[in-house]
């Protein structure tokens, strides 16, 4: 390995990584399989690919081409050298609207091609649900299809010409009429014409095996088309000429409801005569909420196009009239269509968890049968599941007869794996009995290649092996895929994980308390690798800032998986590789909601840091910012805020403090409030009581709408007391009595423990939380106690999630978590008939990432609308993220995250726009990077109330 690494380093201009991290990141794709590579090469151009092939050929080391790593059958993993095309060979080389063609490199993400083609009214037809991160090279390798294949076909239908390097270094240009065919391929085909004409089922979604029938003379002897779907086993793609199609100017989406999935499946084929763009299907057991769908047990998503919205709508209505449905809905609003399509596109992730939370896996992800037989096939498929006592949730491309499904295989025990094999063999026979293909989209890989003889027979599979020998006589390229495959029940990625539960601190309630099960959540669909945020999404800001797999949610999950496996990452919780990958995790919690399978990397990071530094000295920032509540309380008790602020304004002293505290030199230390929020509140309460007594006015004992407790979070208490005072004014104006959660009342300090959690000081966090529960007993133990309003979103999220997950055995934790309301939630639930003051100004800003991920912002949206605050807040993350953006070494990534959406939206805003930022971190980032004052919604409404009073 050392000799190979040295030769690659000498001859390749791109990156060569034989280190633990590089290898660990590519052990898996989105399948059930795992292979440990020797190293990873990120080539800069075709010459680098040729040099890599030469070096690997000389050393007898196999080569695996990899794009987005979202393959579901295991074909993007290997034991040799992995070629990562996403770093450098990811360009759109040209786009010709006149000829409707584009020249692309294999690492180009599909969405980038779509964005470039859109201004010309064009698009690439195939569009897998992973379109925001899958690459054109991967699509060609798997002959990907997507939801619009009923209109525009598969990837093979949209490829004109390829540039390919063979394992022996030959440069070929596969195309039609035998163009680019390797020596020996034409004689092989011409000697087997009869077999090729009769041996392939006639299916719109026949992806299994090699497409040797594309080489028939009556089909144009299309070598490029035949190469598609070869899964990197014949040659290495370095460039492709692809065809584009005209995109409809307007679209409508007809959602057709049926009683069950069989009824939907039987109806799908009959709709094709109306020329829809897509016919997708799914059943109710896949949908988290059916609130936005017409009533029924299963649905078809049928999309139509037209030159105008009216034309598209009319075609959709025609399909509704032609369909025999329980209920229906036609959607023309693009935003509403995107929301509905997201339900379908996230299915590859959401299907990995059954309704009861148990795990489900790919393996039989995309069989295809003739569309007219889909209903019968689904009934037989459900029957086979029942025979094996398995559960699955079918969905997919009903118009093409292609079904996706994740099944709750037990892949952790020998009996479970044996059942997986028996079921796979029986299902393969069932698919063939219905005239189908084992793969209808994602390829065979290791998951299905062993069973190809059931579909094609031994003689055809032997012909596949001979074709492989013509292209790659040394079996250097992705060996074990398609031909001479490894058994489908070997190399399972679960086999290396510990069988006994790992000792952890968090409760992991959704994973049965098992940290390994939590890590297994990541199945590799890689939504975290999306390079652009759409709508309110957050995940994954660090990946978008660096573009590095190690800084994606998936990359970090892969490293944690390898840490638990102990083969590559051998030092467990002490691993520096895992620590370094987690270092740039902002703990934004975006993945908790945006990841289709609910990976919660912020929690995993806190868990890891706890164990990593257990019994050892921590970084200075953990003491400076992790203990922030303690330091600020000390400043408040000693009345030294003026001194702290004065010292922080002296550059040499501030620089020394930042160096000692592990704080980025670029940051300014926020000012501490001279008077804390609760101290000022007590003063005001005493003064109000005295004024009332002098005036002979009795204190109102029972507010008109009840009472709430106001939580004195660290940031409101010590750094932004104006937010607290504003909230009191608004809540009281809404008729709510506001009771402070005061140390003077409880005798103890209260704190959510957020800063200790984010720095992984979990023992300290639990100590603080227990003390808080002791102090809060009088508030949460009484039946019908007033709810607790928390103004800082990150603190509210910590109380709702971290508190019960760190103290799962303390019932008080669950009660306090259930009592927490945000500012907007309190007004909506407790004062539903209150009308807020009108502000009537445009709004910009950013929804706090913890608000988005944990709390939700529905109540905030309605409150802003009622107050006349128009405009959508941006998604993404501000980049400061509590202590993250203040830590030394994080400033550049922090600023890059802010520049993604937040700062551009503020710069483009009208002069009279209100800049909303409910989080202290968001307000600080705006002030320090843009010189803009962001305000909490409570402050804006309080100011409007004062204006009304004047």
Image: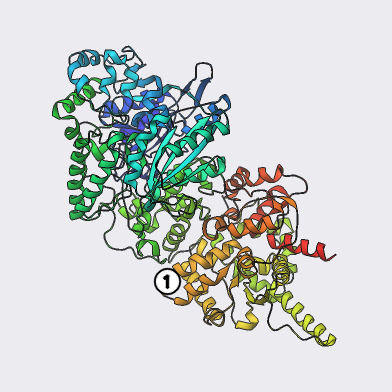
Along the viewing direction, whichever of 805 and 434 lies nearer the viewer: 434
Q: Is residue 543 left or right of residue 196?
A: right
- In the image, is residue 164 above or below residue 479? above
Q: Is residue 412 left or right of residue 583?
A: left
Q: Position of residue 106 (x, y in %)?
A: 42, 28
Q: Is residue 564 left or right of residue 186?
A: right
Q: How is the image coloured?
A: rainbow
Q: Image quadrant for the C terminus?
A: bottom right
What is the number of callouts on the image?
1
Residue drawn at 45 percent across, 38 percent down = 321
Compare residues 875 and 193 and report the one nearer the observer. 193
**Dot 1: element:** loop
Q: Residue at x 33, y 34 (%)?
A: 81
382 is higher (above) or lower (below) than 693: above
* Residue 273 image offset from top left, x and y in percent: 39, 29
For label 1, the crowd category at 10 Å Cα-Cα, with few meaning under 14, some 14 to 19 and many 20 or more, is: some
Image location (x, y in percent) of residue 802: 49, 66
Find residue 883 and report its image quarter. bottom right
The residue that mark 1 highlights is 808
Quarter occupied by residue 866: bottom right
Question: Which residue is depicted at the point 68% across and 82% down?
Answer: 702
Q: State whether residue 72 appears in this view.
A: no
Q: Residue 795: x percent and y percent?
A: 57, 65
Task: Note whether residue 796 is visible.
Answer: yes
């Amino acid at each position: 390995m050392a000799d190979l690494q040295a030769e690659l380093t000498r001859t390749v201009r791109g990156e060569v990584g034989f280190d633990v991290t590089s290898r660990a990141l590519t052990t898996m794709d989105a399948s059930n399989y795992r292979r440990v590579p020797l190293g990873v090469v990120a080539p800069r151009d075709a010459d680098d690919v040729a040099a890599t092939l030469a070096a690997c050929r000389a050393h007898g080391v196999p080569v695996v081409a990899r794009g987005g790593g979202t393959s579901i059958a295991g074909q993007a993993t290997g034991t040799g050298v992995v070629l990562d095309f996403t770093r450098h060979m990811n360009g759109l080389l040209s786009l010709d609207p006149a000829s409707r063609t584009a020249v692309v490199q294999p690492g180009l993400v599909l969405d980038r091609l779509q964005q470039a083609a859109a201004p010309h009214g064009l698009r690439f037809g195939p569009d897998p649900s992973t379109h925001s991160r899958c690459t054109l090279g991967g699509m060609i390798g798997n002959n990907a299809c997507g939801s619009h294949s009923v209109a525009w076909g598969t990837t093979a239908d949209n490829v004109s010409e390829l540039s390919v390097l063979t394992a022996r270094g030959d440069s070929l240009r596969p195309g039609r009429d035998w163009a680019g065919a390797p020596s020996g391929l034409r004689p092989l085909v011409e000697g087997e014409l009869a077999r090729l004409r009769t041996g392939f089922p006639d299916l719109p979604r026949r992806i299994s095996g090699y497409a040797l029938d594309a080489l028939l003379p009556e089909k144009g002897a299309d070598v490029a088309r035949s190469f598609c779907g070869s899964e990197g086993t014949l040659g290495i793609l370095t460039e492709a000429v692809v065809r584009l199609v005209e995109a409809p100017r307007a679209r409508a989406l007809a959602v057709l409801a049926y009683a069950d999935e069989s009824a939907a499946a039987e109806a799908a084929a009959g709709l094709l005569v109306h020329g829809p763009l897509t016919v997708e299907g799914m059943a109710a057991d896949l949908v988290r909420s059916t609130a936005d769908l017409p009533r029924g047990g299963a649905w078809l998503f049928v999309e139509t196009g037209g030159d105008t919205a009216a034309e598209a709508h009319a075609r959709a209505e025609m399909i509704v009239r032609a369909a025999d449905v329980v209920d229906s809905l036609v959607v023309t609003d693009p935003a509403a269509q995107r929301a509905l399509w997201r339900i379908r596109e996230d299915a590859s992730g959401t299907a990995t968890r059954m309704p009861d939370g148990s795990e489900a896996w790919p393996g039989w992800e995309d069989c295809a049968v003739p569309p007219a037989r889909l209903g019968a096939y689904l009934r037989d498929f459900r029957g086979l599941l029942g025979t094996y006592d398995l559960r699955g949730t079918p969905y997919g491309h009903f118009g093409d007869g292609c079904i996706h499904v994740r099944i709750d295989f037990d892949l952790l025990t020998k009996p479970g794996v044996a059942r997986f094999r028996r079921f796979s063999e029986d299902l393969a026979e069932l698919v063939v009995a219905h005239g189908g293909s084992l793969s209808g989209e994602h390829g065979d890989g290791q998951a299905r290649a062993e069973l190809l003889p059931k579909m094609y027979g031994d003689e055809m599979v032997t012909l596949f092996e001979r074709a492989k020998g013509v292209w790659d006589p040394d079996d250097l390229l992705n060996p074990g895929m398609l031909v001479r495959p490894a058994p489908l029940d070997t190399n399972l990625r679960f086999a290396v994980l510990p069988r006994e539960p790992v000792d952890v601190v968090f409760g992991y309630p959704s994973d049965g308390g098992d940290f390994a099960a939590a890590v297994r959540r990541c199945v590799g669909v890689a939504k975290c690798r999306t390079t652009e945020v759409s709508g309110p999404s957050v995940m994954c800001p660090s990946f978008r800032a660096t573009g590095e797999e190690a800084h994606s949610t998936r990359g970090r999950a892969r490293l944690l998986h390898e840490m638990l496996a102990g083969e590559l990452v051998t030092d467990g919780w002490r691993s520096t590789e895992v620590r370094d990958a987690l270092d740039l995790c902002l703990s934004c919690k975006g993945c908790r909601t945006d990841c289709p399978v609910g990976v919660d990397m912020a929690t995993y990071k806190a868990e890891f840091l706890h164990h990593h530094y257990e019994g050892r000295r921590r970084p200075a920032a953990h003491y400076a910012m992790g203990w922030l509540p303690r330091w600020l309380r000390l400043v408040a008790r000693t009345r030294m805020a003026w001194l702290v602020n004065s010292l922080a304004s002296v550059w040499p002293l501030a620089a020394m403090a930042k160096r000692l505290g592990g704080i980025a030199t670029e940051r300014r230390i926020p000012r501490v409030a001279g008077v804390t929020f609760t101290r000022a509140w007590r003063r005001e309460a005493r003064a109000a009581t005295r004024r009332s007594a002098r005036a002979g006015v009795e204190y109102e004992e029972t507010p008109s709408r009840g009472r709430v407790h106001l939580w004195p979070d660290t940031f409101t208490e010590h750094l932004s007391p104006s937010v607290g005072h504003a909230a009191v004014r608004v809540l009281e104006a809404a008729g709510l009595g506001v009771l402070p959660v005061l140390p003077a009342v409880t005798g103890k300090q209260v704190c959510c423990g957020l800063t200790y959690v984010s720095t992984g000081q979990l023992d300290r966090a639990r100590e603080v939380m227990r003390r808080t529960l002791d102090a809060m007993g009088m508030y949460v133990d009484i039946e019908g106690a007033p709810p607790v309003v928390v103004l800082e979103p990150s603190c509210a999220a910590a109380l709702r999630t971290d508190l019960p997950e760190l103290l799962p055995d303390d019932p008080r934790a669950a009660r306090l978590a259930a009592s927490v309301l945000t500012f907007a939630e309190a007004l909506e639930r407790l004062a539903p008939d209150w009308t807020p003051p009108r502000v009537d100004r445009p709004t910009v800003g950013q929804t706090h990432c913890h608000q988005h991920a944990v709390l939700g912002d529905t109540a905030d949206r309605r409150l802003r609308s009622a107050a006349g605050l128009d405009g959508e807040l941006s998604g993404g993350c501000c980049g400061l993220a509590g202590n993250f953006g203040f830590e030394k070494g994080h400033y550049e990534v922090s600023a890059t995250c802010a520049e993604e959406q937040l700062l551009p939206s503020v710069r483009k805003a009208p002069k009279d726009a209100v800049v909303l930022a409910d989080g202290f971190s968001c307000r600080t980032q705006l002030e320090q990077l843009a010189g803009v004052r962001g305000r909490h919604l409570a402050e804006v409404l309080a100011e409007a109330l004062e204006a009304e009073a004047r």
